[in-house]
Amino acid sequence: MEFPVFAKSILPSNDSACRYSICTLVTNPSEYTEMVESFVKAGFQPEFCEFLYCDNSRANQLDAFGAYNEFLNSARGKYIILCHQDILLKYDGIDKLEECIRDLDSKNPEWALMGNAGGMANGQCALRISHPDNQQNTGKFPEQVESLDENFILVKSSVNLCLSHDLKGFHFYGTDICQVARFLGLTAWVIDFHLFHKSEGNYDMHFIEGFRAISRKYGDATRRDYIQTTCAMIPVGNSRWQWRCAIMNLLQKLKKQNDRSATAEMQNVLKQLMGRGNYVMHLILYKMAVPYFNLVRSVRKRWSAKGKTG
């Protein structure tokens, strides 16, 4: 039987106009120029790479979620690099990145994202990055992660990812795109790709707003007890992170790291957000609850270990 003459068959295609699209949100053109020059010097030549930017140097045309969705829609590269303007490829270049891609292709063809820093689980992170005052190299790369730091993220264009359209701002978009990939059955990884990042981020009111927004969004994603379809009732998870408890946890982590400036900044934001009285009350409740939950976790762990050995 013949197909209709006006219908067109499609086949999977690996054709791309270029190898890499390097996409950046720019607030400082001179710093961006320095970044581009470091990429070119590291082997990312304009002959097979395109450099795209969103100019926020005079006013915010787009936030990170909006700009990165524009990049993901417009980029013509087989691989799309979403990166900060304040990174420099001082250490590894295109040959190392190609090696990491080949390695991950063989180990996990379902990968969608890779970066140089990300969170795994239970407070553990995989990091391959240098800042002005330290170098971080933790992990047995490649490491599968739940989120990626936004300083450098490589996206496989063939998986057609996008960021959430109901989130805004300049924080946690790396977390968001990793969660979108996870819902699609795809994976995110930290690879052994070493670069230099001039800053380590900041904690301000916009950080807290972004934290609350993404917490609500992905809490709502698993909040319902079931999904009703025309043929079945499907049970789903019903857990939701309490953002204030998580922020307190982050505050305690900063204190343990003896990061006084970041700790003071976070405390100030929380006091503004909650009010001084509520902040003190939440801190007291947090300190009372943590030992209890640690005890419960320890007992469960022992019973689990006993069950396996017995």
Image (cartoon, helix red, strand yellow):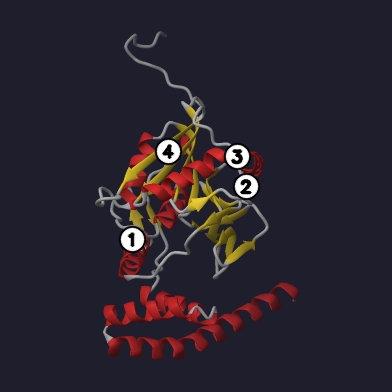
Q: Position of residue 62 (x, y in %)?
A: 28, 49
**Which is more N-terminal, label 4 or label 2?**
2
Q: Position of residue 68 (x, y in %)?
A: 36, 46
Assign a secondary structure to mark 3: helix
Assign a secondary structure to mark 4: loop
**Which is more N-terminal, label 2 or label 1?**
2
Kindly indicate whether the residue at mark 3 contacts the one at mark 2 (C-beta within 8 angstroms): no
Label 1, label 3: how many angstroms apart (C-alpha)? Answer: 36 Å
Q: Residue furthest front?
A: 30
Label 3, label 4: how many angstroms apart (C-alpha)? Answer: 23 Å
Find disc 1 in the rendering and name its residue.
Answer: 217
Assign a secondary structure to mark 1: helix
Please say whether residue 284 is visible from this viewpoint.
Answer: yes
Find disc 4 in the rendering and name its residue.
Answer: 160
**Which is more N-terminal, label 4 or label 3?**
3
Q: Residue furthest right?
A: 309
**Which is more N-terminal, label 3 or label 1?**
3
Amino acid type of the residue that numbered disc 3 sits on in the rendered structure:
Ile
In-image side of 19 versus 303 (left or right): left
Find disc 2 in the rendering and name its residue.
Answer: 92
Badge 3: few (under 14), some or many (20 or more) residues near its Cα, within 10 Å?
Answer: some
Picture quarter with the C terminus? bottom right
Q: Nearer the viewer, residue 3 or 277?
A: 277
Picture quarter with the N terminus? top left
